[in-house]
Image (tube, grey):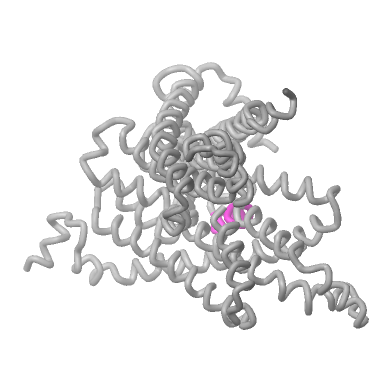
Amino acid sequence: MGVIGEAWTWLTTGANWSGDGGAAHRLAEHLYVSGIALAVACAVALPVALYLGHVGKGGALAVNLSNVGRAVPVFAVLALFMMTPLRNSGYLPTVIALVLFAVPPLLTNAYVGMTGVDRSVLEAARGMGMSGRQLFVRVELPLAYPMIMTGLRSAAVQVIATASIAAMVGLGGLGRIITAGFNTYDTAQVFAGAVLVALLALVVEGVLVALDRLLSPLRRRRTA
Amino acid sequence: MAEQNCLVENDWICGEYLRSRGHELAEATVQHIWITAASVLIGLAVAFPLALLARRGRHFAGPVLGLTTVLYTVPSLAMFSLLLPLFGLSAALVVTGLVLYSLTILVRNILAGLEAVPQEAREAAKGMGYGPVRLLWEVELPLALPALMAGLRIATVSTVALTTVGSLVGKGGLGNLIEDALPSFFKAQVLTASVLCVLLAVAADLLLLGVQRLLTPWTRIRTPARASAGAGIAKTEAV
């Protein structure tokens, strides 16, 4: 119990939050790299997945990509980046690593969502005279929406987790509080940092679940 | 000469490194394998009763699935650090963290497998006088095996990758070598350990695929209906 009390003291001490290595700055770094990486990953993965799903090709790519994403250790990729000149380019190595690990869940889920649309629904829409474009916007996209959001949520969780591991190779982010605690044998600080990282991940997940419910196209249809 | 110099030149690929540090690599690989194996086996032993509990109704399913999902959301670095006051710098800490991660995938897949058992199969077994335990072991479990094995493969592959983060407390198998090589920018060591780690994941996946084929010979009889059912499983696996 002692550690939890000490961690609470650490968290409520203002000095630990201010300054360059303070928790506030680390949190801002974490959110900054995670936000950029998630946006880039969406911009890359979603158009590709939606197009492939629409034309019904590239299933093997979508499935294999997520298997590869699982097998490659985040820590190893970050460490490999640190062996290249990339290490001198600020947040770039972290962002690249985050994008690499966010693309597979986004791509696979969006693709599975698109190809999972009931064939008879597609036939009916075509029978009503919808063009390929109308079919995509008004039938496939709304029906694939839940899976796309599932992909976005797992990508976001993955990004937050990866950004914390960046601290293990000396890059910025909330994880630095944990690694700094390990270096000074300060268990209270390690625990406090871990609570912050875990809370951030849970809050992001919670916000995305709420957004998902608010924005769902099927929900709007029902209330209208 | 060129081969001896590659350590001095800090090349990415270095035969001399493999020769001179072979025992170090082997030691790290062995640690990596036993941490992964222990985590997945304990995970399976915990996940199975949890899945059986979750199957007993919504009262149990909600909390069990909710809790394992929350655990999965916690980043690995935080998970290992949160366990630090309980376990100290030990392999038990890493194994416990990895077990908690594997639960999400294992419980979900075992539950999905058990729920996909056709009602007729259950009825027929009951009609033949099977009790609940025999029904589970001789009818439901074999039919749920493909889904269980799919979950086991996913859990094992992610566990192999996650074990590297255990280097935080000095028990990360090949991750330890990566961590040690960081301060001196020792390229050959980082690349070799990373490649070994991926190879380990692929080997574990293929091994489990082989085990699955041995355990479920009936799934290899290809009829058109079965082939489409197989495609359905592949799809859920991807999620």
Give percent across and percent down for residue A60.
44, 59
Q: Quadrant of residue B126?
A: bottom right
Residue at 46% across, 64% down:
B32
Is residue B46 at least partly visible in the picture?
A: no
Q: Tell me residue B143's x, y (percent).
A: 72, 73
- Identity of the residue furthest to the left in this view: B1
Of the pair A110 and A150, the residue shown nearer to us: A110
Q: Residue A78 at what x, y percent from top left?
A: 35, 45
At a point 61% along the width and 83% down the height, the residue shown is B217
Q: Quadrant of residue A82?
A: top left
Toward the viewer: B140 or B229? Answer: B229
Q: Residue at x 30, y 55 (%)?
A: B190
Query: Majority secondary structure of the magenta segment?
Result: helix
**Quarter of the image with the N terminus of chain B in it:** bottom left
Q: Nearer the viewer, residue B177 or A171?
A: A171
Q: Is residue B83 above or below residue B223?
A: above
Answer above or below: position of B48 versus A47.
Answer: below
Residue range highlighted in magenta = B90-100
Tell me if residue A83 can be seen: yes
Spot occupied by residue B71 in the image (x, y as percentages of width and height) = 64, 45
Residue A155 lies in the magenta stretch: no
